[in-house]
Image (cartoon, rainbow, N blue to C red):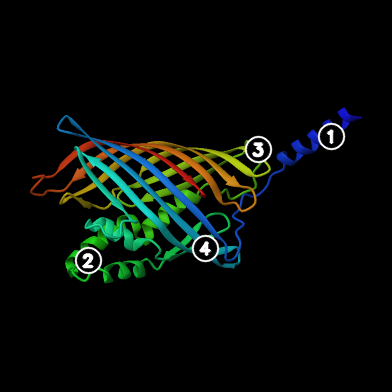
Amino acid sequence: MKISLSLFMLFVSLSCFAQKRMLLLNLKQDSTYYMATDANLSMIEKINGVQHLVSTLISGKLSHKVVSIKDSVYQMEVQYLRINMHMEVEGKKIDFDSSDKVSQNMVSKIASKMVNRPFLMTIDKRGKVLEIKNMENVYAEIFADFPQITASQKAQIKAQLEKTFGEEAIKSSFQNVFTVYPDKEIGLNDQWVAKTKFQTTILANIITTYTLKGITDKIYKIHGDAVIQADGNGAFITRNNIPIRFINVNGTSTTDVQIDLTTGWIKESKMSTAINGIMEAKDSPATPGGLTFPVSVVVDMEMSDK
């Protein structure tokens, strides 16, 4: 009898796991959800046969408060709680820390003004980011604290910030995080394909094949394999007074994600990405006639809801 009961319970358990279900965000009004990120980026530039290594560590944490729910769409009040970066280039170190309130480093000062400044994100239950807005208000508040900055300096700083923290850049970044949600019911070992883009200094298509690898009583376990393909040329940004952009990119990426079974929120994600391409520098005093050189980038990133 005990054996029969055990077999029956095993059958019921297997039947539950075999059932297909929608993987959706199921968030609550006035609740706050967190996303902490740590990224380790290594970039190798080969200029005139000489390799140059740029190492960057970036970490940050955001809060997402659900302020309204309407027709399966969430409006969230999002804000950075911390932003930190450590970069090493040619033996030189560059750091900024949003918690440093007294630093004379302009970048740290700006980072400290960006935290706890809410902006709005609209996202549907399937993880599609519909809109990012109110970043203009964040910029206005930042510059209000720096009356000594000239109008031309403000324009230049804003242009640089928008490459990473502009509304389109943030929308693209968030969408790449939430692309894991399928548009159909899924069961164990089912696959689905998601297509997103890099739309900042890099223009590229990201085509990811996800597989539901496991389901427990608390989480979904999902694995993703992605191919990265160039999609035109990105905009130039200025680095060390040289306008540059990253073109002809291609690469691959793998992701392992754990999603909360109840809320649908990402509990943990680990991603490894390798990209190759060409760095193009405009004609400038430092690069007469312009310059192109190969670049390879490796990024290891971890996220959690802690």
- Mark 1 vs mark 3, CA separation in Å: 20 Å
Are there few (<14), some (14-19), or many (20+) residues within 10 Å of tag 4?
many
User: Where's residue 116, x and y in %?
Assistant: 40, 63
Q: Earlier in the sequence, mark 3 or mark 4?
A: 4
Which residue is labeled 3 in the image? 188
**Residue type for callout 4:** Lys
User: Where's residue 74, x and y in %?
Assistant: 55, 63
Is residue 179 toward the left or the right of residue 161 in the image? Answer: right
Which residue is at the front of the view, 129 or 26? 26
Which label lies toward us, 3 or 2? 2
- For numbered disc 4, what is the local secondary structure? strand
User: Where's residue 217, x and y in %?
Assistant: 68, 43
Q: Earlier in the sequence, mark 3 or mark 2?
A: 2
- Mark 3 vs mark 4, CA separation in Å: 31 Å
- Mark 1 vs mark 2, CA separation in Å: 69 Å
The residue under the point 40% across, 49% down is 197
Which residue is labeled 2 in the image? 154
Is residue 20 toward the left or the right of residue 77 in the image? Answer: right
Are there few (<14), some (14-19), or many (20+) residues within 10 Å of tag 2?
some
- Residue 271's tag is none
| Cβ–Cβ under 8 Å for marks 1 and 3 | no
Q: Earlier in the sequence, mark 1 or mark 3?
A: 1
The residue under the point 62% across, 36% down is 189
- Residue 8's tag is 1
* Residue projecting furthest to the right: 1
The residue under the point 48% across, 58% down is 63
Is residue 31 toward the left or the right of residue 146 in the image? Answer: right
- Number of numbered discs on residues: 4
